[in-house]
Amino acid sequence: ALLGMLLSSALLVSLWVWVSDAPLVWRLADLWLVALNGAATTIMTVLLYWGLARGPVNVVAPIVAAHPVLVLLVYVVFAGIQPLAIQWVAMAATIVGVVMVAGGSDKAKDTDPGSRRELQITLLIALASSLAYAVLVIAGQAAVVVYGVVQTLWLGRLASLAMLFLLYGARRDTPHLSIRWWPFLTLQGMLDASAYLAFFAGSRGQNPEVAMVVASAFGVVTVLLAWVFLKERISAFQWLALVLVFGGVGVLAAHV
């Protein structure tokens, strides 16, 4: 699924670059930024898909969507950003909410050791995806300053494909994609590329962390869609946890 999405989006963005005939920047010293962004995008998405497939979605999505806390901490340590007291409170609320989401799931309450072990694995996958998400955000926002929005997206797509082919090689696996799925994968590629394009565009300026925090609201949509279409049960305890996670993210967005 990821290969089909990346192939379709890479072709569409490449066509856009060719048709627009926009001037390209070839600053070799900073190419590692788009390479890191592309590699992290592949790793994040593979882990995200894996976590969502294992489920429950209402546990995985909030954990991955909490990546702004990691990004903001990096900005604090390395960029000298000094959070306000309310921002520290929001980060703490987000972390507590993530723990509550995981602890409030039906699998967490299951006394069967096998089920609890499966949930622990899913949590580790979601945490790793959140970490990779933070890396792609930081690298992508730094690359936009050098290469611009469209070129960052284009080079990032190519780097993502290269990383995915490396994963296939490591697994000694050959992808098989039925032609009947290509319309859906192409649509997904268009949506994915458009989302990153909007994110990179919003990252330009003096407060790139705003775009990062606001974009993490995808977790709200994901959880609600799983509730409506996958009929995933969300306990009252988890609703409270979701309010903490996304409320914390919202406060961060309002005070950066």
Image (cartoon, rainbow, N blue to C red):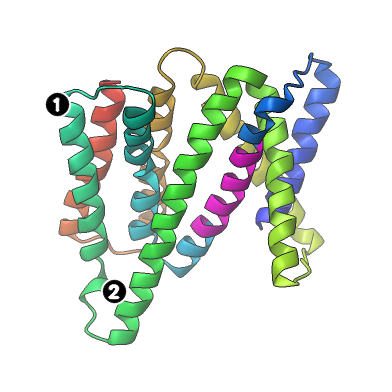
Residue 44 on the magenta segment: yes
- What's drawn in magenta, residue-wise? 35-48
Label annotation for residue 107: 2
- Can residue 208 be seen in this snapshot? yes
Residue type of the residue flagged with mark 1: Ala
- Residue for point 25% across, 21% down: 255
Rendering coords of residue 245 (x, y %): 25, 44
**Image quadrant assignment for residue 158:** top right
- Can residue 231 be seen in this snapshot? no
Q: How many marks?
A: 2
Rendering coords of residue 86 (x, y %): 15, 27
93 is higher (above) or lower (below) than 58: above
Residue 66 on the magenta segment: no
Marks 2 and 1 sit apart, C-alpha to C-alpha, by 35 Å
- Residue for point 20% across, 61% down: 235
**Observer-nearest of 2 and 82:** 82
**Image quadrant assignment for residue 173:** bottom right
- Residue for point 35% across, 52% down: 63
- In what element is the residue under mark 2? helix
Give neighbour class at mark 1: few <14, some 14-19, many 20+ (Cα, 10 Å). few
Q: Which residue is mark 1?
A: 85
- Quarter holding the C terminus? top left
Report the side of 238 relative to 215 (left or right). Answer: left
Residue type of the residue flagged with mark 2: Lys
Report the side of 250 relative to 128 (left or right). Answer: left
- Residue for point 84% across, 16% down: 21
- Look at the numbered discs 2 and 1 and tell me whether their residues touch, using CB distance below 8 Å: no
Give neighbour class at mark 2: few <14, some 14-19, many 20+ (Cα, 10 Å). some
